Amino acid sequence: MKAFKQPFSFISAALLCYFLIPYLIFLKYFNLDFNLDYAEAWWAFKNSSLQAFVTAVIVTGLSIPLSFGVFTLKNPWFALTQKLLLLPQILPALFSILIVFSMVDPFPMGTTGIIIIFTVMHLGFATVLLTAATQERMGSFGLIAEVYDVGRFKFYRRVYCPLMKSNLLTIFVLVFIFCFASFSVPLVAGGGRGTNLEVLIYEKIFINQNWSLAWTLNLLQSFFIFILSYLILKKSALPKVDFEDSKYMQFRLGRVGLFIYLALYGGGYLMGLVKARGALAQFQALLPEIILATQHTLKIMVFYILINILLLITWVYDYVKSGRQNSSRHLLATSTILVGFSFYLLIPETSLGDYFKIILSMTILFFPPLFRSFLEKPLDQLDSQILTCKIFNISTSKIVFTVVLRQIKKPIFLWLSFLTIWFLSDFAILKSLGVRTATVGLMAESFLSSYRLSLAYLLSFYILIVWVFTLLAIYLLKGVFGVINKKFAS
Amino acid sequence: MSSIKNLHLNFDNFDLDISELLIPEKGVTAFWGPSGAGKTTFFKTLIGLYQPKGWSWIFKGEALHAMKLNERRLGVVFQNYELFPHLTAEENIKLICSNHAATAKSIQTVEGYKNKLNLNNCWHTKAQNLSGGEKQRVALLRALVSKPRLLLLDEPFSALDPDLRNEARLMIKNILLQLEIPVYLITHDPDDVKVLAQTIVELRQGRVVGVKKGDN
Amino acid sequence: MKHFIFFLALIFSGLSFFYFNKEDKVNVVEDRTIRIYASASFVAKWGPGPALKELFEKQNIFKVEFIESPDVAMTLQKLNFEKQNASADLILGLDQFDIARSAAKIEWRTLPALSDDMISEVAGALKSQNQFMPYDWAPMTFVGRQDLKVQIDQLDDLLKPELKGRIALQDPRTSSPGLQLLIWIFETKPTEQAIVYLKALMKQAHSFSAGWSGAYGLFKNKQADLVFSYVTSPIYHVVEEHDSSFVSIEMKEALPIQIEFAGIPKTCKNCEGAEQFLRFMASQEAQKIIMNKNYMLPVIERAKEATEFDAIKVYRTLPIKFYDQEKIEKWINQWTEIRKNEGL
């Protein structure tokens, strides 16, 4: 899209400023403080990098056979399995830690332990991502290779890996970043190497009350991630192709691996649920509060989804007009606590303020990584069609609504699924925002912080059910909008 | 005559070097040469994908080199057609029509061409489900309804099997004769040149090695 | 398509306007309202907040508005920035460390004597300062199960080989209980011995969680046999889960105590109401509520009579101290060095 790159786009600048809001707020309130213990920061950086790197390699590698295992399944198991793989995304990190500790006994504390927990937490997500990307990218190459009897391993080496390289790299970088910026896992499982940059940031706040230092560390961390993302994640120019199933895209051992993973993780979760059944009476007694919290959550979620859709349309519009993806897609590891705190400082403590805080912070934290995971590549694949539209002088909005968005419906739906899971289950962001509105995520947090682990388990199951119903509702609404759209268009 | 001057592009393994070229402003001009001759690079430059420094392209008194890509009013048929796969043949055409201020006359034109190009049976079929020949005809219709000043056809028949190719060439030849739109045809197939071209520009290794009259 | 988008935007704007406008009216702050910042577990339905609010409002003209505080450190920083515009009348959930840290940032109101009936362990906290009122407390120790086979009477018993990798602890850099344990070790042992002890304790630790809940979760899940927690923790299991298998371990060393304080910033808008509420919190009724909901000990002796809390042993405790920042940082740095060199 070289011919279309405009030197300056107002929309691009506005989008970038939106995602930089927490940084701008911090700049207003705090000075940068470079009076760091550089040895300590370097130690933390090395720990973060090693843990994140090894995990990302393992997860990316394992997601390949697991995604082939997914392709051995037919609907409805195909769709259901992918939903189940997202379970670690819904549950609080503590649950994943507890499940892994029960799975691996004795548990090897230290870097090995951290890597094991991270792998279990992110493998499902990586597999779902890779499955979607494979369907977009591989077309009928598997079938062609099978017809020509190329041989499975030659196919993987000469066709699959080169074609999927950029997607695999995206998964690698995303997992790396999620692990790099993690807080609770390195602490609990890390032994001496439990210090990472995120822990250092928290330490500066909690122990030293030195926000300037914390913010400086966060800036360094964000800058490192920005550069990493910028250098490694390059655009790929292959067009979208229709996926054809084939023997080479399926792997029975991958299916076995899939079931082992789901059985162990899901089984661990179910065991926790069974143990928690003793708290059912308490849960029932709290049902009015839970329903009220659900109502609040869903109300905020409606606006949250609409704002995300608006952001997406603006982003795509900007992409079509300017010919480049917005730079804020590299803002992948902004510290949760600092984003939360920046809005806590700025926005008043009212119900209306809560809506703004939650929607702003969650879009800023979730939009870039989810966009990169699900929408960036599908958009890139439409480059040649966008070019064709421009040659025929079709207006930008027509290109956006008629050509682009209509062709990435499936990735958008996946993207929305993740937006809603992360929204429903989050409490880390909500806690740091100081919101007063009761939400299901905050309820889970207050259960966890007051002996009520069993109630937290039950609530997590409840959140799972709400998520499924939310997706169904989105699916139905999609159909309704389609009908309205056709009526208006005609 | 249309003139192209100082078109110099350097790539790693290849240079396109056209100091001056005069091309007729009507009829079909074929740019012919083997693979690697520079035809596609030349084509992309005319569309506006490449912007060599200091070059000029004057066509019917207008400096097309100075115009943005979407201002050049070129009708393009790509080698792989680049239809919007999720839209039907009709929707692919209407998308262009609506942009060029659809009038009763345009719609009539579409109807006329639809019949001429034998697109009635596949009019409501999604582009991803069309046959190669149908895609080619839809792509051509799309290029025509955009009311181009110049039609650019990039290997328009290469995706078709030999029997269909002959038929397609003759069909296009008839339509072009009626419309009197100037055409630049990029091809490596001597039969395309033989059937369609009034002027032949031969390219080899990024250079124009000859310009001569065709048999038509 | 344009019409559709415009239509959608119009509906969206309209709904937003009506919705937010309606919400705003409901949330108008009245002059008689006391804005109290407290933790999520305090203001939750199962926490003491709602019951305290109900009882207080029956007895007073003031209204109580609880605002959930994300973290005391963040709340204090916000107050520091807001200065005169700060709207907090009362801050709950401050511990000894928060008080030391906030000294340089926030000015607090001097409090009159709000109760004559404070128990001795806590009364000491009022001798050295008159700006913070304690409202609950608990000694901290190790909590285990009845069937624990290892005899533990003192800190050194935690180094027994049977407990290797079986003690759930908290990271002192991120958790108050974690810091409490660290200080306990440094206060009961000479520095050199404390460092040797900490090195040995590293091997015994199952893990160092970010906070109390992580460590307690691991203990409850039987990943660990012991957890550093409050002496009152077993009472929660007896009352809520009808499970009496948990015990608090008595140690030869005097136990550290965790006290929760309340303070009124000088920038309070409803200072009178805040003081009234503090006075109320020191009353027997309020103390009973806090004790039963927070599972912490009351600061008033009589409040725990005829309850499960009355059955708790009287533990020997360290005197309450407010440590200065440099000392805390020094201890943490020593801990971090030891932790670093524990390696993989």
Image (cartoon, coloured by chain):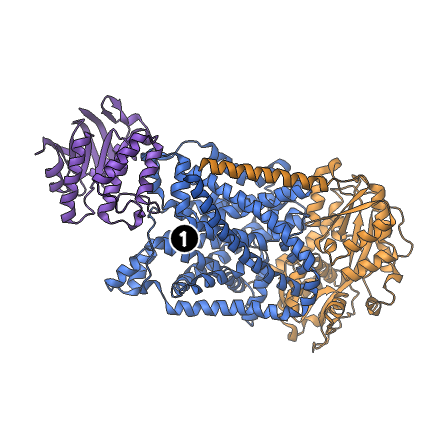
Chain colours: A blue, B purple, C orange
**Residue at point 60%, 38% (across, down):** A25
Instruction: Residue under label 1, please give it.
Output: A169
Residue at image position (56%, 39%) is C11
Q: Is residue A41 left or right of residue A392?
A: right
Chain letter for mark 1? A
Name the residue at 68% across, 49% down: C70
Is A406 drawn above or below residue C117 in the view shown? Answer: above
- Left or right: residue B176 compared with residue A154: left
Q: Residue furthest left?
A: B215
Q: Relative to C163, does residue C278 appear above or below in the rendering?
A: above
Image side of residue C343 versus residue C237, left or right: left
The answer, for residue A172, to whether it is visible in the render is yes
Which quadrant does the N terminus of chain A fall into? top left
In this view of the protein, which residue sits in the foreground, A375 or C74? A375
C129 vs A68: above or below: above
Q: Is residue C334 visible?
A: no
Which kind of residue does numbered mark 1 sit on? Leu
Q: Position of residue A244 (x, y in %)?
A: 32, 58
Going by the picture, which residue comes out furthest to the right? C116
- Answer with the quarter of the image where residue B167 lies: top left
Residue B93 location (% of width, % of height): 31, 39
Q: Quadrant of the C terminus of chain A?
A: top left
Quick one: label 1, few (<14), some, or many (20+) residues within 10 Å?
Answer: some
Q: Is residue A395 above or below residue C247?
A: above
Secondary structure found at label 1: helix
Task: Please provide percent x and percent y for residue A312.
Answer: 48, 43
* Residue drawn at point x = 27 percent, y = 26 percent: B64
Total numbered circles: 1
Percent position of residue B94, x then y: 33, 38
